[in-house]
Amino acid sequence: MAVYALGDRVPEIHETAYVHEQATVIGSVKLGPGASVWPQAVIRADDNIISIGEATSIQDGAVLHCTPVHATTVGNFVTVGHLAHLEGCTVLDHALIGTGSIVLHDALIGEHALVGAAAMVPGKVEVPARAMALGVPVKIREDALPEGHAQMNVDAYLRRGAQFAAELRRID
């Protein structure tokens, strides 16, 4: 895995987190228990802090960044889909961030909320708990989702992270 300190900014990776060898983690990044970071994902905390909670998956090609003003915080049991981009935002527990979506500075994604595939959440927009945010820019459908709607994804990536940590091997 490509894990880098940048000066005194050193990643903190929980012993049960899984980081694929082709993922990149730089600087002030904190990965919680059971978190997973998949191939070509980049988590770069050079100007502030990026915190990723328990059992959260950062899927293939996702990019997480921060700014000198805005930390990036991703809660527990969150799924961040393939090719998503999070920058300077907060994502609360049990949310699902869809494939190819973008969530920008000071945006807040509520618990059990869903940001749809290819959606764009502009800065300072709040997506309430259990709401769906769809489109560019997003339109929000409140109270559209039950609690636990994304738990199947969380469970699958917890199993997958453990399997990859135990069984993945290069054969070239």
Image (tube, rainbow, N blue to C red):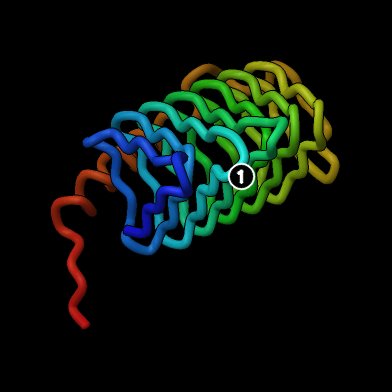
Which of the image's four quarters has the C terminus? bottom left
The image quadrant of residue 65 is: top right
Front one among 70 and 52: 70
Give the percent coordinates (x, y) of residue 163.
20, 50
Front one among 67 and 138: 67
Above or below for 122 versus 83: above
Q: Assign a secondary structure to mark 1.
A: strand
Residue at 66% over, 25% down: 109
Above or below for 155 versus 62: above
Left or right: residue 133 compared with residue 64:
right
Left or right: residue 110 compared with residue 16:
right
Disc 1: which residue: 65
Q: What amino acid type should be assigned to the residue bearing mark 1?
A: His
Front one among 38 and 119: 38
Left or right: residue 158 compared with residue 130:
left
Residue at 47% over, 62% down: 40
Give the percent coordinates (x, y) of residue 129.
64, 16
Give the percent coordinates (x, y) of residue 143.
69, 16
The image quadrant of residue 46 is: top right
Give the percent coordinates (x, y) of residue 111.
57, 18
The image quadrant of residue 133 is: top right
Residue at 15% over, 58% down: 167
